[in-house]
Image (cartoon, rainbow, N blue to C red):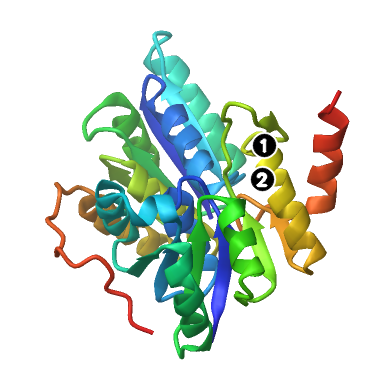
């Protein structure tokens, strides 16, 4: 038993997660990591409601250093979700092992971000985070839904680079 | 197994659009709407679609009981009872659950699932326990 899905998703827990990914992968609880989320009581309440019947733990990056290995070594299966690649890069930097694979879901358009696909926009800091994780041997797949073909970071990186003038 | 969603106006195309946003493409779901062109045109399109799918079991979800989309679907059901089921009052939770289980569920079970999920999908805000993290490893 392990972390069955490590995912970047700027909507964190929503319809695609609860109707599709929970059917495609075994899961008993969701670990959410993000300093911004962990400090936002309103957002935490909304996430708790969105998680429905699934157990939920919300952690700062610092707390996650302890929680993620517990999840990985548990007899249960968990999803690990953060809203930013920077958080995952930080976990990798801190030596946290979440299984070596990282799924990327919706990352919507923000100021300063380049649009790489219908649901993917990344900025320079995101780019650096992905690049760092790839160098550290993390297998990154951009894949909105379980049926979609995952696209590797290499493909998205080339697209980002081609947009740089 | 196929799923057909029918409605007054664009509701059925809209709910299919919402379905796809959450659950992804599904080639086994079809939408037919009653428009200002009236009942005859609707009935022809409905029957044409159902005839094309003659070898299939089909669950038809309709917007409201007693409306034309329901009535025409019911009429078709009466002469094809072995392979058609009709459920009125469709909502998004219903369409998602049924759509995701088309390939692995029998027609009668699918119709029952639609009714149960559809009803359970309607609720107000439930006050959650105050405790933040209820996750145990």
Q: Chain of mark 2?
A: A
Q: Position of residue A61 (x, y in %)?
A: 48, 64
Query: Which sits in the foreground, A49 or A133?
Result: A133
Residue B71 seen from this side: yes
- What residue is drawn where x is 58% and y is 46%? B26
User: Residue at image x 51%, y 25%?
Assistant: B45
- Indicate the secondary structure of the residue bearing disc 2: helix
- Look at the image and tell me whether residue B58 can be seen: no
Residue A156: quarter of image? top right
Residue drawn at x 20%, y 47% is B122
Above or below, comparing residue B79 to residue B42 in the picture: below
* Point 66% across, 63% down: residue: A102
**Residues at badges 2 and 1 in contact (C-beta under 8 Å)?**
yes
> What residue is shown with label 2?
A126
Up the image or down, B50 lies above or below A16; here it is above
Q: Residue furthest top?
A: B36
Distance of label 2 from label 1 (alpha carbons): 5 Å
Q: Looking at the rendering, which quadrant does residue A95 occupy?
A: bottom right
Screen quadrant of the C terminus of chain A: top right
Label annotation for residue B133 = none
Q: Percent from the top left, x then y, of residue B48?
A: 56, 30
Q: Which residue is mark 1?
A: A123
């Amino acid at each position: 038993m392990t972390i069955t899905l490590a995912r970047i998703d700027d909507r964190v827990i929503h319809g695609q997660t609860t109707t599709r990914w929970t059917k495609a992968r075994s899961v008993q609880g969701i670990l959410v990591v993000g300093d911004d989320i962990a400090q936002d009581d309103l957002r935490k309440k909304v996430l708790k409601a969105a998680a429905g019947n699934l157990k939920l733990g919300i952690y700062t990056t610092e707390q996650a250093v302890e929680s993620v290995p517990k999840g990985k070594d548990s007899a249960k299966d968990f999803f690990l979700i953060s809203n930013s690649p920077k958080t995952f890069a930080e976990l990798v930097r801190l030596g946290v092992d979440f299984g070596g694979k990282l799924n990327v879901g919706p990352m919507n358009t923000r100021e300063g971000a380049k649009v790489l696909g219908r649901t993917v926009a990344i900025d320079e800091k995101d780019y650096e985070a992905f690049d760092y994780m790839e160098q550290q041997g993390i297998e990154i797949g951009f894949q909105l839904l379980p049926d979609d073909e995952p696209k590797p970071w290499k493909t998205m990186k080339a697209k980002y680079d081609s947009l740089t003038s | 197994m196929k799923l057909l969603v029918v409605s007054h106006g664009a509701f059925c195309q809209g709910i299919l659009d919402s379905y796809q946003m959450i659950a992804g493409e599904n080639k086994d779901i079809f939408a037919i709407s009653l428009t200002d062109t009236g009942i005859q045109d609707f009935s022809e399109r409905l029957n044409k679609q159902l005839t094309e799918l003659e070898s299939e079991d089909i669950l038809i979800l309709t917007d409201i009981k007693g409306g034309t989309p329901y009535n025409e679907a019911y009429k078709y059901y009466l002469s094809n009872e072995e392979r058609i089921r009709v459920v009125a009052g469709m909502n998004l939770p219903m369409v998602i659950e049924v759509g995701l289980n088309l390939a692995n569920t029998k027609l009668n079970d699918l119709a029952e699932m639609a009714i149960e999920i559809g009803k359970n999908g309607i609720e107000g805000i439930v006050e959650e326990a105050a405790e933040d993290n209820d996750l145990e490893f």
